[in-house]
Image (cartoon, rainbow, N blue to C red):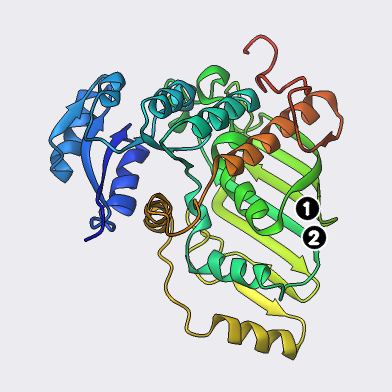
Amino acid sequence: MSRVYTVAVVGGGIGRSHIVEGYEPNKDKYKVIAICDLDPGRRNGLADEFGIERRIENFDDLLKMDDLDIIDICTPPMVHYPMVMAALRAGKHVICEKPLVGSLAEVDEVIAEEKKSKGKLMPVFQYRFGNGIQQVKRVIDAGLAGKPYVGTVETLWRRGPDYYSVPWRGKWKTELGGVLMTHAIHPHDIFTYLMGEPKALFGRVATRVNTIEVEDCISASVEMASGALASFTATLGSADEISRIRLAFENVTIESDHEAYNPGKAIWKILPRNDATKAAIETLLAGWVDVPSRFTTQMRLFWDALEGLGPMPVTSADSRRALEIVTAFYHSSETREEVSFPVGPEHPKYHSWLPEGFA
């Protein structure tokens, strides 16, 4: 009989999606035994809905639970760092929503702490999972796509005053960023997951849609380590909502599904340049086994990793790469200079990407 890991979900907003999509479909692998939330209505409502006995207000109480294996952090961004560090120091496994932490200095501290802890850390990038993106990943990893040429990432979403009526949103010190940090971070992660490491970025950010501190429009030109070129564009002022990734390789052109919040689920367009490539892709994907999207597969693969049956599906290094892109974007927009990767301790925004006066 396989091991069932016990889980505490901290934060009942996106935390509910973790339960519905991640833990309920994987009941043979996980049991949620505690809900932790400062709001008693949300805390008790979620616990009642899923029959969860322990209803916790104080996060520190979770650290003392000997029968608790995993702490799943779904709180506002500004408290991720202290919670992740405390959970790792308590020897718990940790799942944490994006952004993992609020600076490259903090993510490097988390990586160092993870190496000392008996617990393992998995950042959340659920958009990586689903039949569409995983078929494309297999084709690229098999070498059938060939040399990467160019790519585009468009995150065209819509957020208005109702979204920013939540007190911590739209503010540097609590949300830690705008469309770049909170929304486009997912499609940008998909892009690097498929296309590899960035080499340099020139970016601009602007606030044009909402009356908020943080940005809601961004654009960048990116050079990849492979030599491929890319463009990133995002806004929160689109009339409709799509996430679109298009990649041109030597042997294929690939386009994602356009569904804004689950672009990995539906089958992507894979357009081969010749019959030989088409045949090779058909052979590679023959007998394809369904890959459920988002949290369902990410949580299943986390269980595999804990059991030593496979690699961690998302790593702290993946989170660092995402936060490097964020750091480079803000610095480039502020200085009108290109930023080279990797971004290390010598960089002026290593300890904080927040603007002067907010750090």
Cα–Cα gap, marks 1 and 2: 5 Å
Residue 84 sits above or below residue 5 on the image: above
Give the residue at the far top of this rendering.
Answer: 357
Q: Is residue 59 left or right of residue 290?
A: left
Q: Is residue 155 left or right of residue 343?
A: left
Residue type at tag 1 = Ala
Residue at x 51% of width, y 59% of height: 259
Residue at x 66% of width, y 85% of height: 280
Q: Is residue 59 visible?
A: yes
Mark closest to the chain's N terminus, 1 or 2: 2
Mark 1 Cα shell of 10 Å, populated few (<14), some (14-19), many (≥20): many
Closer to the camera in the image, 34 or 274: 34
x and y percent of residue 40 in the render? 20, 24
Q: Is residue 53 left or right of residue 347?
A: left
x and y percent of residue 96 in the render? 44, 36
x and y percent of residue 222 in the render? 80, 46
- Do the residues under discs 1 and 2 have CB atoms within 8 angstroms? yes
Residue 55 sits above or below residue 24 on the image: above
Closer to the camera in the image, 111 or 234: 111
Residue at x 29% of width, y 47% of height: 19
Secondary structure state at the residue bearing disc 2: strand
* Residue 150 numbered mark, or none: 2
Secondary structure state at the residue bearing disc 1: strand
Report the residue marked by disc 1.
Answer: 230
Q: Which of the 4 quarters of the picture holds residue 11?
A: top left
x and y percent of residue 258 in the render? 56, 61
